[in-house]
Image: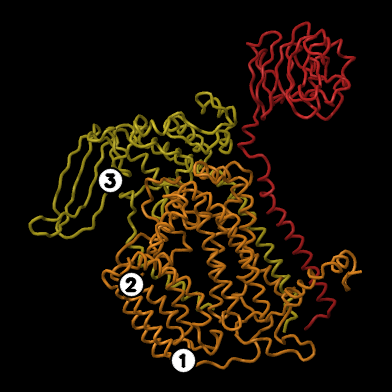
Amino acid sequence: MTESNDAVDDSRRAALLMTGVVGGAGCVAAAVPFVASLTPSERAKAAGAPVVADLSQLALGEKMTVEWRGKPVWVLRRTPEMLASLKKTEGEVADPASKRTAFPTPAYAMNEYRSIKPEYFIAIGICSHLGCNPLGPLAAGAAAPLGNDPGFLCPCHGSTFDVAGRVFKNKPAPDNLEVPPHKYLSDTVVLIGDDSKA
Amino acid sequence: MGLHKTEYKGLLGWFDARMPTLMSEYKKHLAEYYAPKNLNFWYIFGGLAITALVMQIATGIFLTMNYKPDAASAFASVEYIMREVQGGWFIRYMHSTGASFFFIVVYLHMFRGLLYGSYRKPRELVWIFGCLIFLSLMGEAFFGYLLPWGQMSYWGAQVIVNLFGAIPVIGPDLAVLIRGDYVIGDATLNRFFAFHVIAIPLVLLGLVVAHILALHDVGSNNPDGMEIKDTLDPKTGRPLDGIPFHPYYTVHDIYWLSLFLIAFFAVLFLAPEMGGYFLEWNNFIPADPFQGPLHIAPVWYFTPYYSILRATTEYFMWVLAAFTVAYALLVFLSLKNSAARIATLGIALVLVVFMVVPGLKLDPKFWGVVLMGVSVLIFFGLPWLDQSPARSIRYRPGWHFWCLIAFVVIFLVLGYFGTQPPEDTRNLMSQVLTFLYLAFFLLMPWWSRMGEFKPVPARVTFAAH
Amino acid sequence: MKKLIASVAASVALVIFASIGSNARASGAEIHLDHWPEARAHDLAALQNGARLFANYCLNCHSANLMRWNRLQDIGLDERQIKDFLIFGNQKVGDLMTVSLRPRDAKAWFGKAPPDLSVITRARTSFEYKGTDYLYTLLRGYYRDASSPTGWNNVAYPSIAMPHILWERQGPRELTIERVLHVEDEKTKTSSSVRQLSVFDDAGNATVTRTPLKGHFDESTEVSFKPADTAAARQFDSDVADLVAYLNFMTDPSGATRVRIGVWVLVFLSFFTVLAWWLNRTYWKDIK
């Protein structure tokens, strides 16, 4: 009638194991909605949705700014002189081919212009050093740190970038300006924040 | 070197040598806390109450991450949680269902006390801490209910705070102090949020610890009512009818917790509004200070006391005054001490004057508040009101059981009436039931001693299972 | 213990049934409410039709500030459909269903600001009736009433400030309201029952006739409509059922998911309970 101690211990151990495993699975499942509630809500996702920018009114040499995910996104319509300067700055910038991965450059911007269309340069206007907003576009010779190249100058600690957002050598900022995901909906309309093929 | 000697090895040994309290308390309160082996179904509710508390705190923390305690955005922030926060609806429903289940569990837990005389000497303090927990829980629920800022939230708070305004002399100023404004508003919402989220939870946690420590210091009661510590094993010094709480009652509680969770999640997933009792329909209308709902009633767990409040009318004051006189006479005849006798008559006289003497009498509104307060606070008095020679209902005369059942029915019927709009027949019935409710307690020193009591055995009744 | 539970249950049931009689008729709706066909709640086509009706007819005066357009994906629409067919104006699909009518202006123009409809079916529910039944009856309960400021009145909500927005879809109808009233005779101070028949034609002119009744009858109200085009009226009923289905979805968008997950949770817990019972037994069988 009474089992031996070993048998009792075995049945206890088996019951403990099974209940523990199944109970543990239940606890993990119960934790899911709590952890999920920490992820971005629908309101956050809607606010972070892609933004449409209309480039038809943008004059040569001008820069417009749109807000995406709380960050300023620049669209710079580069002049032929600006584009020509990129060949010169190739040797002066720290990461000419945008190989660094801290802010990965999208495949469609892995070219000499760092953009889909050479004429329009699209980048997030936040310095890769400590987050200030660089000034620009500044003409060649307009500011001493930039020297004879057109580009951007960050007023906080003096980092400089060329008109493809590439940081010059020996500056506080380690990375080129980030290129956000984007795609053209037409020749003059670009969707910033979404580069899906669909 | 200052380290304690330890019987444990490894990491536990390292810890135990530096903080032996951990393992000593574990042994004292779990592995070597000897509880009676005959604890039945009615003994699960304490553990379930702790579970409910933990659930409310956990869900409350996550709700606070997204809720906005501001009159202009509170209502919308609750719906934001329900619709836009990932998993938010689940957390919200857990909190709303949890609140109602907390009260169901606590009422059943208290009922066990009535069944088995758990509040009797030497456990009066356990009971008092428990009653304080009950009061704190009522406060916690009241403050929390304002937060969704719906019609019921707003107007329910309005009514309850006005009850405090009914107190003579200091009432109106007290009501302004509570509200922080002349009407329920943003100031009220912010302070109720502070009370609900941190102030009362801290009090609750402290009281729960005190409640359990007080219990463990005297040992648990059991359905047969005798003290298991009266019969010790001569070799080990442990109660013969005792078993270690861990593992026996831990596995026992896990089983019953699982059943409780089935009921809890069935409600949460399939009927979270529970017909308008757990999530009130009127509370889906944003608070409108200019237009109240058709009828304002508190949430179901407060309705018995609300019925008692509503029952107190001008006419009923006369009945109460008569009962006060009769009761004073009864007490007078039962006391021997002349000072106590004079005090009894004096108090009765003062009460009757303020109840019915024209010019001096206080509004029935005030007496309603008093009666409502008495109907809750009277639970504190049970250890002294219950004079039965036997602790447990099992060894008391059969009709005592029916008195207890009658009280439960009275409680439930008063509760149901409290959810309904005022109506003459129901009001009259509420008055009768209020009278019986109070009589159950106030006459207990006499009726609990009457009848044929059965002999209480020395050992527990237990069938192996 | 069984005795205890049984007796408590019986007593409570007795008292509840005894009191129920006095609450049969609801406040707010004096008439019997029609039943909204609940099967529509799970019908995606009905919900989509309802969403379309809502966006076209309701979402000009009424806002739904807590509902996001892209949540309509839950009823089978994709972002393209929502943007092209439902959103008028330049709201984005991730925006909330706000309207430009200010509550202040609405109150001045209509006497009452149109309530936000985000949680309307729950808000209009009571212990006596369901919000879906109420709204289904309300939206189909309009009649022409020449004596009202808007020219419309409603059997479910007398003197309603909202005009009959969907009138074109419903078509003209004649209404007969049959009421049994208690009238007190001034001279003899006795109360007698009277039947009052009010017939509203489709221009809103009322013909009221009263006939005294022999014997005492409870006060009651019965309404019946006679549509000029029964087929149109029946189609209208179906459209309103779809609209109410949509309002019901909008009130509680996670409802369907909730029930689905719930079934699995209960299955899991039942299985876990068996294990917990087994665990309990392995320990307790050596307690004598």
**In this picture, residue C173 sits left or right of residue A148:** left
Check disc 2 and report the residue beneath it: B354
Specify the chain shown as orange: B
Check disc 3 and report the residue beneath it: C223
- Whether residue C57 is visible, yes or no, is no
Tell how many labels.
3
Front residue of C113/C243: it is C113
Residue type indicated by callout 2: Phe
| Rendered-image quadrant of the N terminus of chain C | bottom right
Q: CA distance from mark 3 to mark 1?
A: 63 Å
Percent of width and height locating residue A178: 77, 24
Q: Is residue B105 above or below residue C265?
A: below
Check disc 1 and report the residue beneath it: B451
Q: Are marks 1 and 2 on the same chain?
A: yes
Percent of width and height locating residue C255: 55, 47
The crowding category of the residue bearing disc 1, from other C-alpha atoms within 10 Å (few below 14, some 14 to 19, many at least 20), is few
Query: What is the drawing colour of chain A?
Result: red
Report in which chain the residue with disc 1 lies: B
Give me the residue at 80% from left, 25% from top.
Answer: A157
Q: Are marks 2 and 3 on the same chain?
A: no
**SS at mark 1?**
loop
Q: CA distance from mark 2 to mark 3?
A: 54 Å
Tags 3 and 1 in contact by the CB under 8 Å rule? Answer: no
| Rendered-image quadrant of the C terminus of chain C | bottom right
Q: Nearer the viewer, mark 2 or mark 3?
A: 2
